[in-house]
Image: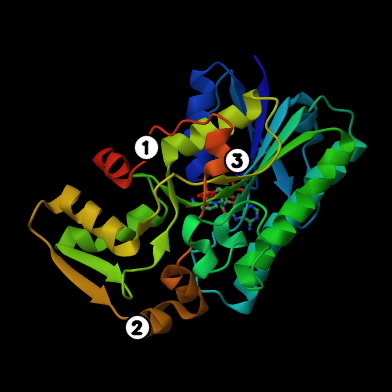
Amino acid sequence: MATVLITGGTGLIGRALTKALLEKGYEVIILTRSPAKSTTHTSRLSYAAWDLTAQMVDAAAIIKADHIIHLAGAGVADQRWTKKRKQEIVESRVKSGELLVKTLKETANKVQSVISSSAIGWYGPNDKEQNRGFTEDASPAPDFLGQTCKQWEASIEPVTQLGKRLVKLRTGIVLSKDGGALKEFLKPLHYGIASILGTGRQMISWIHIDDMVRLYITAIEKETMSGVYNAVAPSPVTNKQLIMALARKKRGRFFIPVYVPSFLLKIMLGEMSVEVLKSTTVSCEKLSKDGFVFQYPTITAAVNDIK
Ligand SMILES: NC(=O)c1ccc[n+]([C@@H]2O[C@H](COP(=O)([O-])OP(=O)(O)OC[C@H]3O[C@@H](n4cnc5c(N)ncnc54)[C@H](OP(=O)(O)O)[C@@H]3O)[C@@H](O)[C@H]2O)c1
């Protein structure tokens, strides 16, 4: 069975993807900054090191790989967007992409495809024409995330000149009970509070973790896939719809909806508040036309899966 190298495979998506790939019989190598921390080695799961500052990567791992899944990057919503953090968000993606390209160029290898994460941050806020959802041909937004995604995608693009098939997945908010945005949305519900952000009317384009994982595996296995795809479920919801669905699932009728005003979010989150208050409706039409069937197409289906 083929070997899949996953950069940033220790994260939320990477952990779920590794489990699914191992279940399907693949060999997995996780490329990480801290291989020493990883204890779950098996005959089909191993870890290899890289260091973006030193532009060093364990070339033996690249030599073994048939496919590369590129997930590495400093968490966009993990910390306040200081100048230093913004630089880390960009550099962790761009330098890692460049290092992969350089290594693939300089090392004899059998890598067939590179599947890279990108994000719907590529698109700016909705305008009147976007009510049917942004499609992949839209230009990147001029804001921080739009320009980050543009540089991120550009850094990995040269693999196509090396004869590798490249798929870029512009990913929406990944809903997983194991972490990410959902964990943050659920915190106030422990105290019976359904915390609706701003007006709650902003659109969220999301995808269930299981569909995300199936999509990465599809992108490896389906050789006709190439280029950019929006990785979002077919039914975006408003922030209020999402929070209320979670509240009903977790608390039945026993919760109090509370609107967190925009000005408070701006004080709490700084510039990052723009992202939680922004409406972005993204279309999955290209993926659906390509035959991908979502296991969790609606927010009800996704929330029902969250125990
Ligand atoms: N989860 C979402 O809702 C979502 C939405 C849109 C796009 N995405 C993108 O999808 C990718 C995977 O998402 P995820 O949720 O699995 O992310 P995650 O849990 O934050 O994991 C990302 C991994 O990247 C590595 N990393 C972190 N900081 C780094 C740095 N400064 N330099 C190099 N590597 C670094 C880490 O691996 P090591 O510590 O082992 O090196 C980490 O485990 C990310 O690029 C993310 O931006 C995610």
Give the mark toward the camera: 1 or 3: 1
- Residue 296 — which label? 1
**Quadrant where the image shows the N terminus:** top right
Relative to 46, is 189 above or below? below
**Quadrant where the image shows the C terminus:** top left
- Dot placed on the residue nearer the N-terminal end, 1 or 3: 3
Which residue shows up at 52% across the image and 62% down it?
A: 130
Looking at the rendered structure, the kind of residue marked 3 is Ala
* Helix, strand or loop for disc 3: helix
In front of the other: 126 or 103: 126
- Dot placed on the residue nearer the N-terminal end, 3 or 2: 3
User: CB of residue at label 1: within 8 Å of ligand 1?
Assistant: no
Residue 180 in the image: state x and y as whole percent: 42, 53
Residue labelled with disc 3: 36
Q: CA distance from mark 1 to mark 3?
A: 36 Å
- On the picture, is 108 further left or further right than 169? right
Q: CA distance from mark 1 to mark 2?
A: 33 Å
- On the picture, is 244 further left or further right than 230? left
Give the mark toward the camera: 1 or 2: 1
Q: CA distance from mark 3 to mark 2?
A: 41 Å
Residue 86 in the image: state x and y as whole percent: 63, 71
Residue 126 in sight here: no
- On the picture, is 201 further left or further right than 166? left
How many numbered marks appear? 3
Which residue shows up at 53% across the image and 39% down it?
A: 14
Looking at the rendered structure, the kind of residue marked 2 is Leu
In front of the other: 63 or 143: 143
Say few, some or many: other residues with alpha carbon within 10 Å of mark 3 (under 14 / 14 to 19 / 20 or more).
few
Looking at the rendered structure, the kind of residue marked 1 is Tyr
Residue labelled with disc 2: 264
Which residue shows up at 78% across the image and 53% down it?
A: 155
**Outermost residue toward the front?**
129
